[in-house]
Image (cartoon, rainbow, N blue to C red):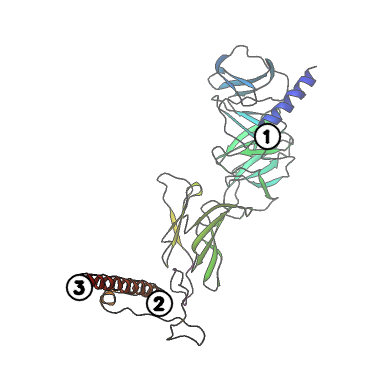
Amino acid sequence: MRTALRAAVATALLAGLAVTPVLATGTAFAADGPAATAENGTLVRTETLYNGTVVKIYKLGPTWYRAESFKNGQSIGSVEANARAAAGNDNGNYLVLFEDGRTLAWRGNVVSPAELGLYRLADGTVVELGKNPKDGRFGLQPVDKTGQGGGFVYAYHPVRSVWTYGKAVVVLENDGGLAAYVPGQAEQAAPVHLGAGVNPKPAPKPGTVLSGPTANGCTVTEKIASVFPYWTVTLTNDLKKGPEAVLRDDAGKVVGTADRQHPVDGRYGLKIEGADTAAPKLGQRTQGGDMPYRWVDFPKLPQDCSSTTPTATPTPAPTSGSGGNGGQTTVVPKGGVAAGAEFGSVEHANDTALLASAGGAAAVVAAGLGFTALRRRTAADRG
């Protein structure tokens, strides 16, 4: 009976949590093992999740909390953290309960089973998954940019253990499965296996030119390192279209763009200055507020491309009269109109000439009307 109930609840939880991972306060979770009771604890808060699960967080001591989940009034499991964080896993739905009562819940971002070796987490942190040769327990150690390990820490929980590396919270299953989540970060991903026994290549310094510049006519492109580790920015400087910066993650996916029409991408810290000049610059930063930008120059245009302003299409040279190849006839106004006329181009001159011609026609019509009125007055005088 209990097995059937747990199976039904697990299905409901899976359906309710199959959404974008979120940071949740007080999120409950169906953990492995029998349902726990809330004996000898003080209830500190109760929350209802979006899938209808009711969560009760109990304080059992200064660094001892329990999160118990209920569905239809029935307890479906609990997670208990005593001086160390603990985690539950229900078909890929994770709940971490910290020893201060905080909780963190997400779905996915898991590698199971995981191979031994180096892994890069979603925030760029690198860890190594290893195995204790004495007792067979799995463990993790942080690895710095030079490839040096900080020392293994092995599983301490009978089912799964929790650590924080960099900004990422990592859950290690006792069978070697590995899951991670970066609180507050929009882009999430499962740990990426970098290989076994291979030191990770350090992330290049932001702004480092990775390829290019490559010119194609009056368009120049180069790729540089982003301020986000292992991400890149492709810089394009085009005579007519202006500058463009395209930010890609380590998988090559486009995550941010800035150009002449939209020079700021606040979400990913891209900003173009001087987009209408011959020397545009790109600013990058990893977060908002007062965080300063790192500035780099866009690749320079070739010497024969001297302006970032699109060149106007030339108008055929004016000709006199008609015939030939059908060239246009430029009418140069005289008198008062010509005295103040300033023509910036042939096209403007033609427009002004048309206006002058229209004015001349109006003058002729006005003169004709005056002549008619004069004739009528003379006839009247003669009676």
- Distance from label 2 to label 1 (Cα)? 64 Å
Q: Which mark is residue 382?
A: 3
The kind of residue on which mark 3 rests is: Arg
Picture layout, residue 67 above or below residue 176: above
- Dot 3 or dot 1: first in sequence order is 1
> Which amino acid is tagged 2?
Val
Q: Nearer the viewer, residue 260 or 334?
A: 334
Say whether residue 304 is magenta. yes
Q: Main secondary structure of the magenta part?
A: loop
**Where residue 132 sits: x, y (%)?**
71, 38
Which residue shows up at 80% across the image and 16% down it? 1
**Residue interval drawn in magenta:** 298-310
- Mark 3 to mark 1: distance in Å? 103 Å
Where residue 36 appears, as percent x and y from the top left, is 68, 17
Furthest residue toward front: 383
Amino acid bearing label 1: Ala
Question: Is residue 60 positioned above or below 185 on the image?
Answer: above
- Comparing 85 with 134, the one in front is 85
Q: Is residue 203 visible?
A: no
Identify the residue at the far top of this view.
Answer: 40
Which mark is in front, 3 or 1? 3
Give the mark, 2 or 1, whose residue is nearer the N terminus.
1
The mark that comes first in sequence, 3 or 2, is 2
Q: Is residue 187 left or right of residue 13?
A: left
Label 2 belongs to which residue? 346
**Residue 18: image tag:** 1
Assign a secondary structure to mark 2: helix
Cβ atoms under marks 3 and 1 closer than 8 Å = no
